[in-house]
Amino acid sequence: MGAELLTIGTELLLGQIVDTNAGWMAQRLAEAGIDVHYKSTVGDNWNRIDAAMRLAMSRADVVIMTGGLGPTEDDLTRDVLAAVLGRPLVLDPRVLSAIEQRFAHRRVAMPENNRKQAMVPEGAEVLHNPRGTAPGLWVRQGRSALVCMPGVPSEMKPMLLDQVIPRLRTAFDIRSRIVSRVLKTCGISESALDERIGDYFRDMRNPTIGVLAHAGEIHVRLTCKGEDPGEIAARLDALEEKIRARLGHLVFGRDDEKLEAVVGRLLRARQSTLAVAESCTGGLIASRLTDVPGSSDYFERGVVAYSLEAKRRLLNVPADLLERHGAVSLAVARAMAIGVRKTSGAALGLATTGIAGPSGGTPDTPVGLVCAALAWDGGEGAREFRLLGDREQVKYRGAQMALEMLRRHLLGVPMDEV
Amino acid sequence: MGAELLTIGTELLLGQIVDTNAGWMAQRLAEAGIDVHYKSTVGDNWNRIDAAMRLAMSRADVVIMTGGLGPTEDDLTRDVLAAVLGRPLVLDPRVLSAIEQRFAHRRVAMPENNRKQAMVPEGAEVLHNPRGTAPGLWVRQGRSALVCMPGVPSEMKPMLLDQVIPRLRTAFDIRSRIVSRVLKTCGISESALDERIGDYFRDMRNPTIGVLAHAGEIHVRLTCKGEDPGEIAARLDALEEKIRARLGHLVFGRDDEKLEAVVGRLLRARQSTLAVAESCTGGLIASRLTDVPGSSDYFERGVVAYSLEAKRRLLNVPADLLERHGAVSLAVARAMAIGVRKTSGAALGLATTGIAGPSGGTPDTPVGLVCAALAWDGGEGAREFRLLGDREQVKYRGAQMALEMLRRHLLGVPMDEV
């Protein structure tokens, strides 16, 4: 059984909107055991939509379309579909009343145009859209299933998951599914990872293992195919356990967990507090930490000490240290961490200083050099990193390394183990 | 003359990589007067690539393909293209020597696989790829033109602009082109914008005007079609001048200019310096300002004063003010701006305090309430904003409003004019 995705809209075709729907749908369908073989986009043009629909129906059992269901003249999907199926459009009074209610709720008169959204091809089943005026459509024609959904991601996503995928699995008697799990690591190289778990990538068949490098992180993706959700989970659990036995604390999180959220959880669990002193990362560490809801429980303050004056005055970095070692040095990073910890009264002080570029590098302190340091009750540590990328990437990766230092400290494991 | 884009790769089809190439190519082609009618994606499967190529050739004069030119077994584009064209693959010795040189330069032996990248369909012209091992291909077959490019964006983009588009314009005698220009505004509502320039959107034909809302910004896009680049520029200039006459300082920048870069340029031009005190924006203002190369010239320091203690100690916010007005108040924002200006010695102090959510809101200080303030030599100002969105959006929009306050101050125009 093969599926084809057809996204409709001139703004998608011209790239004025990046089409994130098609990729998301393909992933969710693959997980539900439905293989996508083609993905196409057409503009708001009757003949081309007509041709694309007919072609898709000729080569796929399932055609999933998004877009073109709005109330304006450009929105042709519903009309073209009826024509391709050779069925009349009929008014669905329940859909009309749902649309009228939405407008009544907002105390706005329903424009006459929106009536069009209540017209459905005869025999089509309406997919309820609680978040918008455009309902979805589910139509069987012979062996095929045709689905239309609105293009707005927040309307489309729950419709696909809650209404379309269950119908497809029943209609095509699909039993298998694919489940992925991602284990995230930070501060280890791809080759070091290969040395530790390379035998698993090469030998495993189900689950399989893939490795993907992200900015400052390497992700290990486990993918398992099967029919029984319990058995799939058990297989993934078993492989995850084996990988964790080899990688230990190098795995900082799973799936959508972000490093700043993991660090925040550890700080909260230890009832610890943190203050951050940033030079080259320019506030990004503070901003990432405060993206996490509830971070005010452990994040005491941040200082962005861009000038020498700010390093001296706000963080008590001794002037002679700045002169002797230069602002970008392990000694200054260490003094910044100690300074922000002392002046804030937080349990931990984290600091960065470096050269984000694009200019300002020298042979001794090249662009991409970042020094990070952590101060705690009774000690401190500092490390130097040589990072690649443009200014924003160096900032991001520097923030990543500093957060990873903090995470390892909270777990009591050394930073230099990779 | 119509073009079709065909992106090849299972990872694109499955959504493991978001396809940003197709949209980018469609925009650049449209600007060069080449209309894209279809966009499709197929996985790394011989039969499906073959079918997709034949279909594209049957319905478009120009077929532009990306991906599948690498050295591995999955990379089929070159072989399928030769088969579809009915031409043999021949070794191009210059391509082989270029690939060998790349490896020699890195002091790595060339794997035997990479030889495959030097095979080209007979009669094809090779498109040089200075950034990678996969060369592009340009083939004429009858009236049609077929183009293959690598899928890596940094390799594909210069190839399209420098080699493919000029060849297409010559081959199809295309004279017209489309040029867009974006004027960016901040702190004005879409309806207020409509009141000021709505007559232009409705009446203009060439250039046309479109309006698009972004997070915290509204963009006005002018699009002009014509043959003579000088005439197009003159028409855009004339319309831009008319719009600027109506909008004045509300336009903060053009095309890719970011608000933080515009503010930075104004600070540098006035030889002014800035210190920032952030509560709800959590370091994001500092991070955005320091994303701009050279920001150390005017950005003195930032303070992320998340705790009451930090507001009191680092910014000298009086304890009774915090008690009387609460931390989220115009009075406290003003005191933070004054405090950070005084303690830093910077010419300007910018501050935010608010409720980013998702929890912590009350009827008086709901989630999304952000107070921003600016202090300067001889005065200060504060404003309250009620922003929509999740935690990260409130942070972003709050930062945006604070930066816009600063921009207007630097220009000497009031914040509340919209």
Image (cartoon, coloured by chain):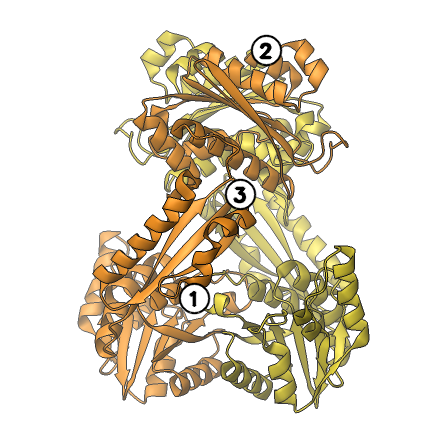
Chain colours: A orange, B yellow
Residue A124: image x %, image y %? 24, 79
Dot 2 corresponds to which residue? A313
Q: Is residue A402 visible?
A: yes
Q: Nearer the viewer, residue A118 or B248?
A: A118
Dot 3 and dot 2 residues touching (CB under 8 Å): no
Q: Nearer the viewer, residue B274 or A259?
A: A259
Kind of element beneath mark 3: loop
- Disc 3 chain ID: A
What is the quadrant of residue A322 in the picture?
Answer: top right
Q: Quadrant of the N terminus of chain B?
A: bottom right
Q: CA distance from mark 3 to mark 1?
A: 27 Å
Q: Nearer the viewer, residue A110 or A62?
A: A62
Residue B121: image x %, image y %? 71, 83
Residue drawn at x 54%, y 58% as measured from the top left: B210
Residue drawn at x 23%, y 69% as measured from the top left: A166
Q: Is residue A256 visible?
A: no
Q: CA distance from mark 3 to mark 2?
A: 32 Å
Dot 1 corresponds to which residue? A22
Mark 3 surroundings within 10 Å by alpha-carbon count, few (fewer than 14), some (14 through 19), many (20 or more): many
Mark 2 surroundings within 10 Å by alpha-carbon count, few (fewer than 14), some (14 through 19), many (20 or more): some
- Disc 1 chain ID: A
Q: CA distance from mark 2 to mark 1?
A: 53 Å
Name the amino acid, label 2: Arg
Name the amino acid, label 3: Gly
Dot 3 corresponds to which residue? A216
Residue A181: image x %, image y %? 36, 54
